[in-house]
């Protein structure tokens, strides 16, 4: 990339790399405190009303006393990585760049650990700024097998989370994701293919296809994230780590006959969980 100490002038380096010379001097502006507060409220509203698009979110924010335009809401939704959830036409049409795999869990009885794993990304607000959380969950036992934070939604940290889960646990038979570019790209699906794992993907806009991960996001935010005001990424990582240890080892689940995810994963009994 650009080397400011190189003998070649910056103009020539930019020309060789086919990038705008003007972009060399761009300094990104931090997100304003007002936008950070609005994004946190939008995150709460999205958990409550996942079907709400930019128009409805604008109106819900206005009801809270925050006057904001739809374009502004749309831009913040794109930054956060959220969108309204509903069935769209032509949902079976694959994306142009990445292969989209069929959903394999419909009607499947999931009754043992490592039968199905799933993953997703969610937005995590901080006092100043925000990060993204990626987690890999064992579907049947709800146990979080690996997780990572990142300040971008690039695929790399999702691949690292997957590789960490595979390195410390038995391989699953099926791995389920949404159709996001982080999960449908070759870097992520290649790891699954090399490990002989069947790939399953949610229908576009069908949040219920990955409902247990969605429920986990609600738990982690209302039981941990919204009760804190993380000052920085290290604090967020440490506090989330404590919560996830609690979630796996001490928090009982009604769906697991009041056992913890650790108990269900390491001491399996017949599970009554279906997709």
Image (cartoon, grey):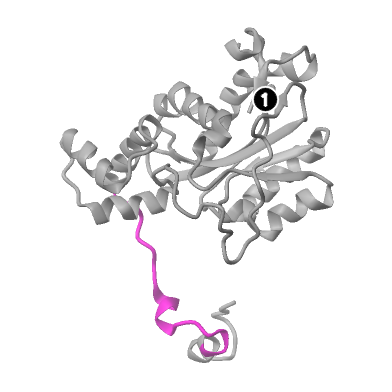
Expressed as whole percent of the image width and height from the top left, the position of residue 107 reads: 66, 29
199 horizontally vs 87: left or right: right
Work out whether residue 129 or residue 106 is closer to the camera in this orientation and state it.
106
Query: What is the residue that sits farthest to the top in this orientation?
Result: 258
User: Where in the figure is residue 73, as x and y percent of width and height?
Assistant: 28, 50
Which element carries disc 1, helix, strand or loop? loop
- Taking the image as shown, residue 119 lies to the left or right of residue 25, namely right
Q: Is residue 261 left or right of residue 220?
A: right
Residue that label 1 marks:
143
Q: In the rendered image, which quarter contains the N terminus? A: bottom right
In the picture, residue 21 is in which quadrant? bottom left
Q: How many numbered discs?
A: 1
- Residue 181 in picture, x, y percent from top left: 57, 56
Q: Would residue 17 be counted in the magenta stretch?
A: yes
Whether residue 244 is visible, yes or no, is: yes
| Residue 70 to residue 222: above or below | below
Q: Residues within 10 Å of mark 1 (few under 14, many from 20)?
A: many
Quadrant where the C terminus is found in the figure? top right
The answer to whether residue 147 is visible is no
Q: Is residue 146 magenta?
A: no
Please name whichever residue, 65 or 236, is drawn nearer the observer in this view of the structure.
Answer: 65
- Residue 225 percent coordinates (x, y): 45, 29
Q: Which residues are magenta?
A: 15-32
Q: Residue at x 54, y 31 (%)?
A: 211
- Residue pictured at 20% horizontal, 40% vertical: 59
User: Vertical placement of 258 versus 76: above or below?
Assistant: above
């Amino acid at each position: 990339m650009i080397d400011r100490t190189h003998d070649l002038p910056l103009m020539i380096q930019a020309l060789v790399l086919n990038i705008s010379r003007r972009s060399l001097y761009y300094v990104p502006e931090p997100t304003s405190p007002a936008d950070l507060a609005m994004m946190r409220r939008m995150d709460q509203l999205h958990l409550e009303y996942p079907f709400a698009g930019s128009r409805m979110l604008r109106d819900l924010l206005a009801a809270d006393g925050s006057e904001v335009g739809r374009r502004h809401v749309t831009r913040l939704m794109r930054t956060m990585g959220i969108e309204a959830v509903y069935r769209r036409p032509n949902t079976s049409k694959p994306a142009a760049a990445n292969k989209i795999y069929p959903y394999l869990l419909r009607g499947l009885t999931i009754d043992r650990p490592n039968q199905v794993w799933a993953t997703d990304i969610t937005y995590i607000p901080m006092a100043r700024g925000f990060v993204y959380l990626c987690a890999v969950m064992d579907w049947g036992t709800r146990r979080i097998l690996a997780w990572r934070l990142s300040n971008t939604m690039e695929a790399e940290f999702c691949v690292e989370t997957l590789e960490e889960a595979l390195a410390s646990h038995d391989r699953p038979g099926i791995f389920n994701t949404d159709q996001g570019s982080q999960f449908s790209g070759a870097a992520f699906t290649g790891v699954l293919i090399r490990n002989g794992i069947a790939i399953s993907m949610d229908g576009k806009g069908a949040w219920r296809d990955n409902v247990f991960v969605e429920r986990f996001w609600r738990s982690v935010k209302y039981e941990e994230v919204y009760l804190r005001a993380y000052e920085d990424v290290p604090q967020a990582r440490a506090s989330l780590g404590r919560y996830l240890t609690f979630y796996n080892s001490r928090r009982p689940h009604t769906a697991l006959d009041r056992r913890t995810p650790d108990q269900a994963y390491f001491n399996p009994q017949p599970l009554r969980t279906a997709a």
